Image (spheres, rainbow, N blue to C red):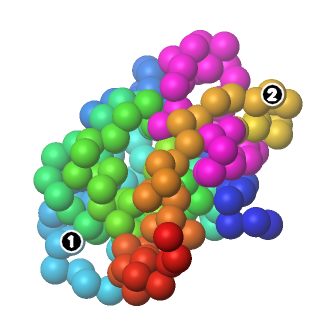
């Protein structure tokens, strides 16, 4: 599959009352007790270890699966491990109406697709995005398609810089090639 296209099962982060979880902070994503871990491969099993009801996510998630979360995903401290744990699990993307500025920047720098999904509340109310659905997203054009329920939904496309870093693999790889581009 083309690098611009991501496809996988979605995990809609809901609380025990069935509401989408908002303001998920970096401590809920990757607990500060695990900060001494430096091997990215060891970070994956610890993802969401402090998010009530989602501690088993790493054992359920498969490569390419995507996360759908509420507003302000990644709030809190600048914790690179909160991005790296999803890279270790080979999560395909995170879709949310908004991200904290620091989390968004860390994800972009890592070449990890974080995409804004406008209208998530409406999509959830209409039961158009449900955990287990298979979706495909085009990161460049900002289009999503729920293959299970057969409908399309909008995403904000990546900015030019975000897309260039994503295509390169991460900010460091992008930096090595940026000077080689012809204007």
* Image position of 43 with respect to 137: above or below: below
Vertical relation: 181 (above or below) 166: below
Between 104 and 147, the one lying in front of the other is 104
Label 1 residue SS: helix
Q: Residue at x 25, y 45 (%)?
A: 101
Q: Are marks 1 and 2 in contact (CB under 8 Å)?
A: no
In the foreground, 44 or 183: 183
Q: Is residue 81 visible?
A: yes
Span of residues in magenta: 116-143
Residue located at (73% from left, 47% from top): 136
Whichever of callouts 1 and 2 sits on the residue coming sooner in the sequence is 1
Q: Is residue 114 left or right of residue 150?
A: left
In percent of width and height, residue 128 lies at: 70, 24
Q: Residue at x 30, y 61 (%)?
A: 106
Q: Residue at x 45, y 57 (%)?
A: 162
**Viewport quadrant of the N terminus:** bottom right
Residue 34 — which label?
Answer: 1
């Amino acid at each position: 599959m083309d690098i611009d296209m991501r496809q996988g099962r979605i995990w809609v982060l809901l609380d025990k009352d069935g509401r989408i979880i908002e303001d998920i902070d970096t401590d809920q994503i990757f607990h500060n007790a695990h900060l001494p871990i430096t091997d990215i491969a060891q970070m994956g099993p610890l993802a969401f270890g402090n998010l009530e009801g989602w501690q088993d996510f790493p054992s359920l998630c498969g490569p390419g699966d995507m996360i759908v979360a509420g507003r302000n995903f990644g709030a809190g401290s600048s914790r690179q491990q909160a991005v790296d744990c999803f890279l270790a699990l080979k999560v395909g993307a995170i879709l949310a109406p908004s991200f904290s500025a620091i989390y968004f920047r860390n994800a972009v720098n890592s070449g990890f697709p974080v995409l804004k999904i406008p209208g998530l509340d409406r999509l959830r109310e209409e039961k158009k995005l449900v955990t287990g659905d298979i979706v495909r997203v085009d990161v460049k054009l900002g289009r999503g398609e729920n293959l299970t329920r057969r409908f399309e939904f909008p995403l904000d496309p990546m900015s030019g810089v975000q897309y260039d870093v994503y295509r390169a693999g991460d900010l460091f790889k992008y930096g090595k090639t940026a000077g080689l581009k012809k204007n």
